[in-house]
Image: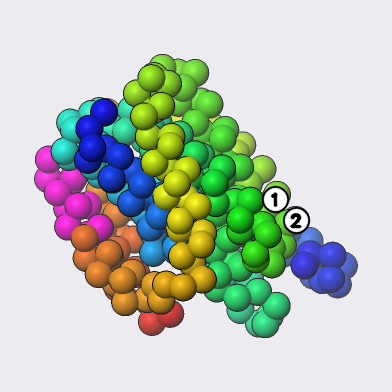
Amino acid sequence: MTALDVVISALAATLAGTGVGGGGVLIIYLSLARGINQLACQGINLFAFLSSAAGAVPLHAKRRKMDIAAVIIIGAVGALFSFFGFRAANMISRDLLRGIFGAFLVFGGMRTLWNKN
Amino acid sequence: MLSQISKSRRFPRALTLAATGALAGLINGMLGTGGGIISVFALTKIYAASAKYSTKDIFAMTYASSAVMSVAAAVMYLARGSFALSDAAPFILPSVVGGIAGAILLDHVKADVFRKLFALLVIWAGLSMMAK
């Protein structure tokens, strides 16, 4: 654990919390700077995201209007389909998985740049 | 809310939400992140005609639904031995603090400009990961 680990994980969680988007920051850091394999990066990122959600979701629930039924439907179906996504991640090589993740980042970034809203 | 939607529209809307969850979960499980992009996009479309929910409300809903699906994904990664709890443990406290800070800052930050700059960084990182 380095000071940079602390800074990057706090920054990623803060960015995610403000709506700027930061879900991939920790994966990028762990993969490119720390050289950790892609699947481990993704697992650690999920765990870190849950930690940030433990702090953020109660605050959001108090301060925001939420359609709880929509949250439950998306979350529950998403939990089910996470299984298929995880199976797919395990069926392909780590390098291909990193490439797909990279392509997803490029796609997401381009979409954000071109999105007028 | 769903309960306020007429019965005739409730099923298609629930189906859209389920399809959103399916795609978001698939991506989240496969890439360990990214499901939120799908949820934000879908919820923005779903509530476009309604003044009831702001962009920040939609973001909060996305955050909460992503947390639900991420529990399942994290358990799968952990059970399969993709990472050890000891590897992830050091990131817990900074992430909790960052999550709280982000939820508070959401009221004060005008994220649009910053989001565009961040998008450039993400594109660079994505290209680097593809080239590695």
**Which residue occupies the extreme left position in the image?**
B131
State left or right for residue B120 relative to residue B93: left
Q: Mark 2 falls on what kind of element? A: helix
Residue corresponding to mark 1: A73
Location of residue B79 in the rendering, given as x and y in whole percent from the top left corner: 49, 18
Q: What residue do we see at 37% from left, 34% from top? A: B91
Mark 1 crowdedness (10 Å alpha carbons): few <14, some 14-19, many ≥20: many
As drawn, the label of residue B97 is none
Q: Is residue A68 left or right of residue B125?
A: right
Identity, as a three-letter code, of the amino acid under mark 1: Ile
Evaluate if marks 2 and 1 touch, with contact meaning CB atoms under 8 Å apart: yes
Question: What element does badge 1 sit on?
Answer: helix
Q: Is residue A31 above or below residue A73?
A: above
Q: Residues within 10 Å of mark 2 (few under 14, many from 20)?
A: some
Q: Over which residues does the magenta segment extend?
A: B122-132
The mark found on residue A69 in the picture is 2
Give the prevailing secondary structure in the magenta stretch: helix
Foreground residue among B124 and B9: B124
Residue found at x 61% / y 42%: B68
User: CA separation, marks 2 and 1?
Assistant: 6 Å
Nearest the viewer among B12 and A61 is A61
- Chain letter of mark 2 equals A
Residue plotted at (42% across, 72% down): B109
The kind of residue tagged 2 is Ala
Horizontal side of B117 relative to A83 (left or right) equals left
* Residue A93: percent from left, percent from top: 27, 28
Quadrant where the N terminus of chain A is found in the figure: top left
Residue B36 visible within the image: no
